[in-house]
Image (cartoon, grey):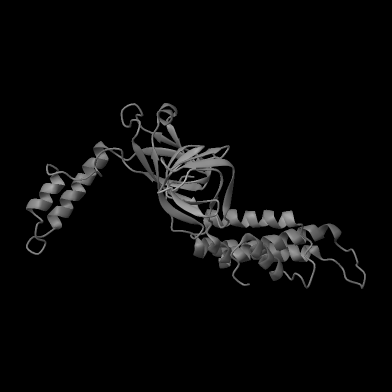
Amino acid sequence: MATPSTRAEFKTYCLRKLGFPVIEINVDDDQVEDRIDDALSYFQDYHFDGTEKMYMKHQLTAVDINRRWIYAPDAVTFVTGIFPFDNSNASINMFDLRYQLRLNDLYDFTSVSYVSYEITMQHLRTLEMLFSGTPQFRFNRKQNKVFIDIDWTRDVQVGDYIIVECYRALNPSTITLTGTMSYTASSNAVVGFGTKFDQEFLENDFITFNGVDEFQVDKILSPTSLTVRGPMVNTTANVSATISGNSDVFGDRFFKKYATALIKMQWGNNLKKFAGVQLPGGVTLNGKEIYDEAVEELAKLEEEMQIINVLPNEILMG
């Protein structure tokens, strides 16, 4: 089973690589779980396959406007931009300059040059940046808040959408939400008690209820309510919800090596406490050598990460 697809298979793979069951690996099960979590956190922070670029939409409420920030779910690791709030990206009408240029000058690309059109568009974009600008924002992933530095009383109003360009950490495991949840067929609404929908979901995620009915999230209305894209056939109470993980992460070459090296370091660190102890048969524990080997392996892997597997430089806030 060289390509694990679940966390249990991944843990077994790492222990087998260290020699189990031929030799005893002196690491507690909780320690193995902790080291896998450490490896996953490092993978999500630095590896180009650990995150996905996406666009998160949020419909403003009166609460958002009063507090002057919007909530970002735990899965959001970086925010790289926010779409402008003006109508520069709206549908073009017949009185728009771009519409007139295309209508009168570019109706036939074979007979005219589009150089002047490109220059004009660049000029318009420059004017847009001078007079409208790009919304400034602040984000820290430990706060789960996107602070937008705008005039909240003039630039936006209740019901407007904010589009956030961001990166989301890939979770390899399937998440199961517990608690009392119900969904209503007539409104495609899902209500949960004690369930933090705004922490677990992003809009357009796919969720499965009771392991059977799969729906795509339409809007997250509050921490305990959301709507899905139907059609919902029945109204059901006391349902469970699951979010499928990206199991291919468990098969990543770097992730497997890094997690195994972390477990090996934990193993050596445990055995270092018994240095020089002679076991029956004349065997002597040498935890320091195992620990040093693991530290060297980790250093090489982290160097490889920075050289090969890190995304190109980009301004990231998070």
Q: Quadrant of the N terminus?
A: bottom right
Q: What residue appears at the point 44 percent right and 33 percent down from the top-left corner?
A: 69
Residue 238 or 217: which is nearer the viewer? 238
Q: Position of residue 123 (x, y in %)?
A: 19, 47
Q: Position of residue 169 (x, y in %)?
A: 51, 52
Q: What residue appears at the point 16 percent right and 49 percent down from the top-left corner?
A: 120
* 241 w.r.t. 43: above or below: above
Q: What residue appears at the point 7 percent right and 52 percent down from the top-left corner?
A: 104
Determine which quarter of the picture holds residue 57.
top left
* 115 w.r.t. 217: above or below: below
Residue 49 seen in this snapshot: yes
Drawn side of residue 266 relative to residue 317, left or right: right
* 142 w.r.t. 271: above or below: above
Q: Position of residue 285 (x, y in %)?
A: 84, 66
Residue 314 seen in this snapshot: no
Residue 182 or 50: which is nearer the viewer? 182
Q: Which residue is outermost to the front?
A: 234
Residue 219 or 4: which is nearer the viewer? 219
Q: Position of residue 311 (x, y in %)?
A: 46, 58
Number of residue marks? 0
Determine which quarter of the picture holds residue 28.
bottom right
Determine which quarter of the picture holds residue 301.
bottom right
Residue 275 or 135: which is nearer the viewer? 135
Drawn side of residue 112 relative to residue 250, left or right: left
